[in-house]
Image (cartoon, rainbow, N blue to C red):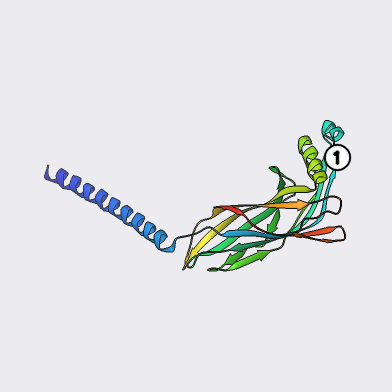
């Protein structure tokens, strides 16, 4: 009877010690978070240079047949800032592509993997290209209407995987999503005040804050 009682007491002590250890770990994690205050990176779309934005179709006839093909060549300048004082960021994989009204209109462009130190700023200038990309019939009509109106809204999207670095500790991977709206002016040589026209190429000074989610 005494041996059974001693065994039960040891088990209760073991469980109590285990729970105390778990609670201690949770407290340490909370204190580290409270001290470091990790903040997601900030993205700004600085400019966009449009070399090609050509829609084949975009009228009622094309909408009926579904023959709407969009060719896009745009170079963008994306600036990413790490706002943290004590946390570095590893960008393990970052893809950039363009969308129009929720539909992807260019394949993803892979950016080189990089590390961003405390308070550092990284600037990427990738090309996003889409050659004769099929678009939904109704979107073809809307692109044509927007171009005729002289103003098209596209979104530069960023999808990636990042890790946080605190001292020698490196976290697991987190999903990064950024959405950068860009208004582009077209038609009749009428370009907006934030654009520079060189031949058939227009460069847009945007300095547009992006919506970032981690």
Q: Name which residue lies at 73% across and 50% down.
A: 107
Residue 99 visible within the image: yes
Residue 89 locus on image (x, y percent): 55, 63
Q: Which image quarter is the N terminus in?
A: top left
Residue 25 locus on image (x, y percent): 35, 56
Q: Name which residue lies at 42% across and 59% down.
A: 33
Residue at the farthest top position: 64
Q: For label 1, count other residues whose C-alpha is less than 10 Å away and answer few (under 14), some (14-19) or many (20+).
A: many
Q: Name which residue lies at 29% across and 52% down.
A: 18
Residue at the farthest left position: 2
Q: How many marks?
A: 1
- In the image, residue 201 above or below residue 154: below
- In the image, residue 126 above or below residue 19: below
Q: Name which residue lies at 86% across and 40% down.
A: 57
Give the structural element (helix, strand or loop) at label 1.
loop
Residue 176 visible within the image: no
Name the image quarter holding residue 144.
Answer: top right
Residue 91 appears left or right of 198:
left
User: What residue is shown with label 1?
Assistant: 57
Q: Nearer the viewer, residue 32 or 148?
A: 148
Residue 136 locus on image (x, y percent): 76, 37
Name the image quarter holding residue 137.
Answer: top right
Residue 131 locus on image (x, y percent): 82, 49
């Amino acid at each position: 009877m005494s041996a059974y009682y001693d065994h039960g007491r040891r088990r209760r002590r073991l469980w109590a010690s285990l729970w105390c250890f778990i609670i201690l770990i949770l407290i340490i994690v909370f204190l580290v978070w409270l001290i470091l205050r990790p903040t997601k990176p900030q993205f700004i779309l600085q400019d966009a240079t449009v070399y090609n934005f050509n829609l084949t179709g975009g009228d009622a006839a094309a909408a009926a047949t579904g023959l709407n093909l969009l060719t896009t060549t745009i170079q963008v300048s994306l600036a990413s800032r790490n706002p943290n004082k004590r946390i570095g960021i590893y960008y393990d994989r970052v893809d950039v592509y363009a969308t129009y009204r929720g539909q992807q209109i260019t394949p993803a462009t892979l950016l080189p993997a990089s590390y961003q130190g405390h308070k550092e700023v990284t600037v990427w200038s990738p090309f996003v290209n889409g050659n004769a990309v099929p678009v939904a019939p109704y979107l073809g009509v809307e692109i044509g209407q927007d171009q005729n109106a002289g103003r098209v809204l596209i979104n530069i999207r960023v999808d990636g995987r990042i890790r946080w670095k605190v001292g020698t500790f490196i976290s697991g991977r987190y999903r990064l999503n950024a959405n950068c709206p860009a208004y582009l002016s077209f038609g009749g040589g009428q370009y907006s005040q934030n654009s520079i026209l060189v031949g058939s190429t227009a460069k847009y000074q945007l300095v547009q804050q992006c919506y970032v989610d981690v």
